[in-house]
Image: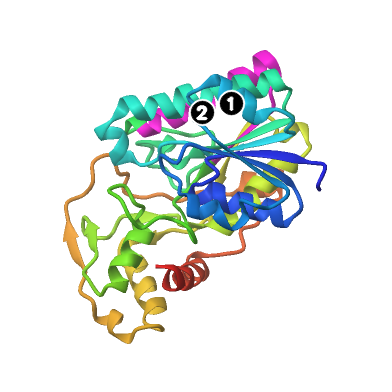
Amino acid sequence: MKSIKVLVTGAAGFIGSNLCEFLLNDNYNVTGLDNFSNGHYHNIEPFIQHPNFTFIEGDIRDLETCHSAVAGCDYVLHQAALGSVPRSIKDPITSNDVNVSGFLNMLVACKDAGIKKMVYAASSSTYGDSESLPKVEDKIGRPLSPYAITKFVNELYADVFYKTYGLNTIGLRYFNVFGRKQDPNGAYAAVIPTFTATLMKKESPVINGDGSYSRDFTYIDNVIQANVKAMLVDSPESENQVFNVAYGDRTTLVELIEYLKKHLSKFDSEIQDVVVKHGPNRAGDIPHSLASIEKAQRLLGYEPQFNIDQGLKEAVEWYWSNL
């Protein structure tokens, strides 16, 4: 695989750094691009000196940087984005600049460089106010946040670039990804690392609403598998497609807390007795999310290996050793 060169944008972030690590371990040549607005140097530090790894500190909002980053690459795994629904509600302009203008820059750079394929991080937020379950790729609703709009626009741009310029793209609609290296700190931290860090301190986690909202939580190794299979799949049916990346099961927030308590209690039994608090529902949140993964199974050969319980066991062990 040393002859295959892959650009990972958002390389110092949660998903990007895990992808870099996997690809390097599999003997790919990897270029990482990140501006450290969300990512952390410590995520890439273990392999920053790897002979097959090149790191570029730069911003996807700069087209020249995007052109430099894709130079000589065969594939692009585009993970760079400003995530978080609440962040986009507070600051829709910056979310749009990064997620739409930055995405467009990457498409242009990939087109100009003749990249074989760009696999990009799409989002389950695109399903918006659609109440149908499970979520099927060709049935979406109206977006409920600026973030959701930006990720839907990504799909529209990718489609146009395929039809107009022949740029092969695949979008992966992630469903609540979690796992090692996911940052528990900051105002927009995801729910699993936030709950985990809070419980480890034996403090009360705060659930938005009554805890009945449910999500299709997806362990990072399932997401890595989907990216690699999407990158390497070579069939006309898979081109210019969007796929759900999930486990295909849903867990309520109350159930999530119980899973976390179970796994954390193996390290400290007192965590089992921590009391949970409840706050108001969060603006822009959808009540339930559950993916159909049939399309990804059929066209990509995607077979997720970690359910929520197995994934949380792995994640908790990582957090216990690293926080």
Residue at 32% in and 44% down: 286
Image coordinates for residue 225, horizontal then vertical, percent: 65, 53
Q: Please name whichever residue, 131 or 166, is drawn nearer the observer in this view of the structure.
A: 166
Which numbered dot is residue 189?
none
**Colour option used:** rainbow
The image position of residue 18, as x and y in percent, is 57, 53
Label 1: which secondary element: helix
* Quarter holding residue 162: top right
In three-dimensional space, the C-alpha distance between marks 1 and 2, rounded to whole angstroms, equals 6 Å
Query: Against 67, is 38 above or below?
Result: below
Please identify the quadrant where the C terminus is shown. bottom left
Q: Residue at x 76, y 52 (%)?
A: 27
At which x and y percent is residue 226? 63, 49
64 versus 126 height, above or below = above
Residue 306: name its quadrant: bottom right
User: Disc 1 marks which residue?
Assistant: 66
Badge 2 marks a residue whose secondary structure is: loop
Q: Which residue is located at x 36 percent, y 66 percent?
A: 256
Identify residue for label 2.
60
Asked whether residue 152 is drawn in magenta, I would say yes
Rate crowding at label 1 as few (under 14), some (14 to 19) or many (20 or more) other CA atoms within 10 Å. Answer: many
Q: Is residue 322 above or below residue 80?
A: below
Apparent side of residue 66 relative to residue 189 in the rendered image (left or right): right
Q: Position of residue 262 (x, y in %)?
A: 38, 78
| Label located before the other in sequence (1 or 2) | 2
Q: Residue at x 61, y 58 (%)?
A: 304
The amino acid sitting under disc 2 is: Ile
Q: Is residue 90 visible?
A: yes
Q: Magenta span covers which residues?
A: 147-172
Crowd class of label 2 (few under 14; some 14 to 19; many from 20; radius 10 Å)? many
Type of amino acid under label 1: Cys
Proximity of marks 1 and 2: CB atoms separated by less than 8 Å: yes
